[in-house]
Image: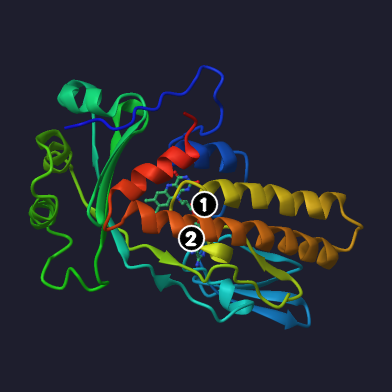
Amino acid sequence: MTVLRDWRPRPDDRANPEIDRGQLRDLLLGPLDVQWGRGVTQVVPGTRDGVLVHFADGRQETFDLVVGADGAWSRVRPAVSSVTPHYTGVTSIETSLDDVDTRHPDLARLIGDGSVAVYGVNRSLVAQRNSGGHVKVYTKFRAPLDWHTNLDLADVEAVRSSLLALFDGWDAPVLDLLRNGTAFVHRPFYVLPVSQTWTHVFGVTLLGDAAHLMPPLGVGANLAMLEGAELAESIATGPGDLDEAVRAFEEQMWARAGRWAKITMAGLERLVSPDPAEALALFDQVQPS
Ligand SMILES: Cc1cc2nc3c(=O)[nH]c(=O)nc-3n(C[C@H](O)[C@H](O)[C@H](O)COP(=O)(O)OP(=O)(O)OC[C@H]3O[C@@H](n4cnc5c(N)ncnc54)[C@H](O)[C@@H]3O)c2cc1C
């Protein structure tokens, strides 16, 4: 295997901090009174008492403002827009390894303290170290949405064989990441149209993936968190009119999200490309030399 680039952060480099999802969630939501498992089924704006929210447990409540931060398949989004996500043509199967330093020391060395990325024709594999010796392995490849018609995605060994066939010819350590993966999760990449906006609806807004689902190229969680903070700030420090504060927030979010949607769509084209050199060229553009 030939290492084409080896990027190491400088001691003062704070550009791309990483944190496990569970840790981030505990950090952000730990102090809050979250009613887990209380799914929203529908949001109806414009009722006499405010915005009506239907919950999966059959209950209904009205609110002054409903913020749809409920991800790609948002149940709040239909209250402001009829748009739905569409498939990018790139799908992903994710697997993971535990106790990598003790169980798979060679793979631990390959991944190092960060991640290792390997690019081929219309496919790629990235292994990323999480905390506690846990490693996430993401395969990405171009395929029609129904590529797995003859594959039982719940059958771990069948999925493993299918991936080993797809990555046939890749170097042994890379394939070992798949051979030692414990479970496989299929995640087709869907996106919302680039630069999508909506006609402002009194009492309802969206943020994060619900507002601007884009290819997962390392910005989605950051945008969602930034937008949450900006919406709160706009309401807290604005002119006192809740609706004006939400409108101002939306304008700011749409402009930035539109720029990132273009960047990440173009990035996905280059990272899962017929010409693997495109991935390298992209990294050379964004990484400090
Ligand atoms: C493989 C992969 C790797 C990624 N890597 C990165 C990365 O390195 N960096 C980065 O910044 N981003 C990354 N992303 C993107 C990132 O995960 C998302 O952009 C981010 O999670 C969006 O946050 P969100 O809060 O908008 O939505 P989500 O994280 O999807 O959260 C939505 C929440 O709403 C809840 N919910 C959904 N429906 C309902 C309902 N009906 N009622 C009540 N609650 C509901 C869900 O349970 C969930 O808790 C990655 C994505 C993928 C798929």
Query: Is residue 3 found left or right of 57 in the rendered image?
Result: left
- The residue at which mark 2 appears reads as 214
Horizontal and vertical percent for residue 145? 27, 72
Work out whether 129 lies above or below 248: above
Query: Is residue 55 found left or right of 165 in the rendered image?
Result: right
Residue 289 visible to the viewer: yes
Q: Which mark is residue 193?
A: none
Q: Secondary structure at mark 2?
A: loop
Dot 2, how many residues are within 10 Å of its Cα: few (below 14), some (14-19), or many (20+)?
many
Q: Is mark 2 within 8 Å of ligand 1?
A: yes
In the figure, residue 102 lies in which quadrant? Answer: top left
**What residue occupies the far top of the structure in this picture?**
11
Work out whether 118 lies above or below 243: above
Work out whether 162 lies above or below 170: below
* Nearest to N terminus: mark 1 or mark 2: 2
Dot 1, how many residues are within 10 Å of its Cα: few (below 14), some (14-19), or many (20+)?
many
- The residue at which mark 1 appears reads as 220
Q: Is mark 1 within 8 Å of ligand 1?
A: yes
